[in-house]
Amino acid sequence: MRIAIQQPHFFPWLGYFDKMAKVDAFVLMDEVQLEKRSPMTRNRILARNGDIRYFTIAANQRGSREKPYREIPLSEDPKWKVSNCRQLQDYYQKAPCYREIMPLLEAFYRQEFQSLCDCTVKSIRLVKELLEIPTELPAQSRLDYDKSQRKSDLVLALCLAAGADTYLAGRGASMRYLEREKFAEKGVEIIFQDFQHPVYPQCNSTAFVPGISTLDMLFNCGVRESRRIFWETVKNGREFDGTEG
């Protein structure tokens, strides 16, 4: 079984879903500590003038260092939902597929979320369904593993708990900290994602801006075309073992 492991992100970028589509199971790390000012609470979109702006979940982060991500509550004030919707409406009302996508997001924000984690996971599942990604999304908290492990050893413990023989890692810090020998000893091969971002028309910028929320592609291309672009990118992508130059 091939797996990937990642913290839940709020309406993630395309590279997140590319990795998800290339594995059998995508473990969502809901027992880690919240990283402030990260995609665990916010993501980036394009304003009408082409500037990058954040749209953010209002969470009650008091005491967040002493509790796992899945236990962090949302703000009791629901105005952040209205603010998010108005921001998306303002930035993307001229987008070609605004009328197709905005009702889906309005329905998303009408939901009652039990926690910060519940909100981010539901945002992931919404896009996952639109792109028709069949990958399973097990939660870290549902796996039986040694909770004392950290960093590379934690990743390995989760791989073993999930029954993985291959771990798909992102290109970046994981290339430096993963202890490949330990994985090999346990029969787990490490491969790395090499994501090539697709280019599509953006109503808010003449020069393409990569790395922002997948919502940008959905607003600009619609569900059907976004799905085509996404799966073509997945098909043409590659992985490498980390020993290449």
Image (spheres, helix red, strand yellow):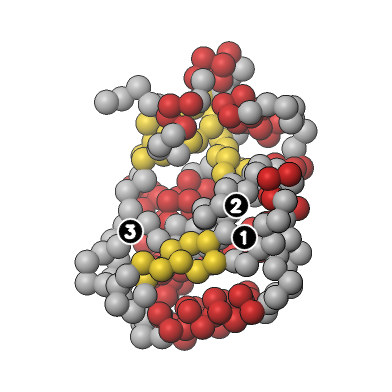
Image location (x, y in percent) of residue 124: 58, 59
Q: Which residue is mark 2?
A: 8
Instruction: Work out which quarter of the rendered image holds the N terminus and state it.
Output: top right
Q: Which residue is mark 3?
A: 210
Helix, strand or loop under label 3: loop
Label 3 crowd bin: few (<14), some (14–19), many (20+), radius 10 Å: some
Can residue 135 be spotted in the picture?
no
Q: Are marks 2 and 1 in contact (CB under 8 Å)?
A: yes
Distance from disc 2 to disc 3, alpha carbons, whole Å, reads: 20 Å
Q: Are marks 3 and 1 in contact (CB under 8 Å)?
A: no
Q: Residue at x 66, y 42 (%)?
A: 32
Q: Is residue 223 left or right of residue 46?
A: right
Image location (x, y in percent) of residue 245: 27, 26
Label 2 crowd bin: few (<14), some (14–19), many (20+), radius 10 Å: many
Image location (x, y in percent) of residue 2: 56, 35
Q: Give above or below for 75 relative to 186.
A: below
Q: Give above or below for 64 relative to 172.
A: below
Can residue 110 be spotted in the picture?
yes
Q: Amino acid at mark 3?
A: Pro
Q: Residue furthest front?
A: 62
Q: Which residue is mark 1?
A: 120
Query: Which quadrant holds residue 134?
Result: bottom right
